[in-house]
Amino acid sequence: MWRIVSILILLFANPAGAKWNNDAEQCFRLIAKGVDPDVRIGYCDRAIKSGELSGVNLGVTYYNRGIAYASLGEREKAIRDFSETIEQQPKNADAYYNRGLANAQLGKTEAAIEDYSESIRLEPKDAEAPYNRGLAYLRTEKYEYAVRDFSEVIRIQPRNAEAHVYRGIARLYQGKEKEADADFQKAFQLNPGLKKKIQPIIDETKAKTKKSSKE
């Protein structure tokens, strides 16, 4: 899920005297209202091209246009805009997180991991970035790192059933079936509805890991 800029960013991070304009305000407000992305992009374009914005305001406008592009599936354009946001706001954890999502969806897993890592460094109490980095580590077969990330998610959100499932899957690939089964049991306890959906994946993973161990 893409992260939308909070109004608090503008209220508390905007320096006195920073320039804002109507197009930038519409670009910002229409994001929250779910208005058609092309309409939002039009406002954002005009605001950026006006040359009146700088700093936080310019960064937020690029960010909101990035969200609009992402919602249209134009991930390369979204990445460029999130990168522009980072240029203006190097400590914007959400921009790194969203760029990580876009990179992951384009199959750029290593770039996504780098973005998630920076988001985690800037916002260590967040659970979404380590969750998604854990998924990226699973895809790249870095199971120890995946277990570490899902464990961090569980520390922050003890009732996150999906984190237990994915940590269990990573542990299966590590050959730790007992610990994995404990994770699956906890996940199904937290969310019984997961069992029907996840059990076939667990069974397939167990069969795959057992076959690999015999080869």
Image (cartoon, rainbow, N blue to C red):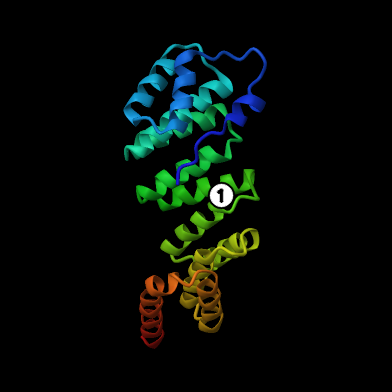
Residue 45 horizontal/vertical position (percent): 39, 20
Q: Amino acid at mark 1?
A: Ser
* Residue at 38 percent of width and 74 percent of height: 196
SS state under label 1: helix
Q: Considering only vertical position in the picture, is 148 above or below 123?
A: below
Residue lying at the far bottom in this picture: please name it: 214
Residue 92 horizontal/vertical position (percent): 58, 36
Residue 47 horizontal/vertical position (percent): 44, 16
* Residue at 45 percent of width and 64 percent of height: 138
How many tags in the picture? 1
Query: Mark 1 packing: few (<14 Cα in 10 Å), some, or many (20+)?
Result: many
Which quarter of the rendering shows the C terminus? bottom left
Q: Considering only vertical position in the picture, is 196 above or below 99?
A: below
Foreground: 66 or 91?
Answer: 66
Residue 62 horizontal/vertical position (percent): 46, 27
* Residue at 52 percent of width and 71 percent of height: 187
User: Is residue 85 rendered to the left or right of residue 42?
Assistant: right
Hey, which quadrant is residue 179 in on the image?
Answer: bottom right
Residue holding disc 1: 117
User: Is residue 110 rendered to the left or right of residue 122?
Assistant: left
Foreground: 15 or 91?
Answer: 15
* Residue at 43 percent of width and 74 percent of height: 195
Foreground: 105 or 9?
Answer: 9
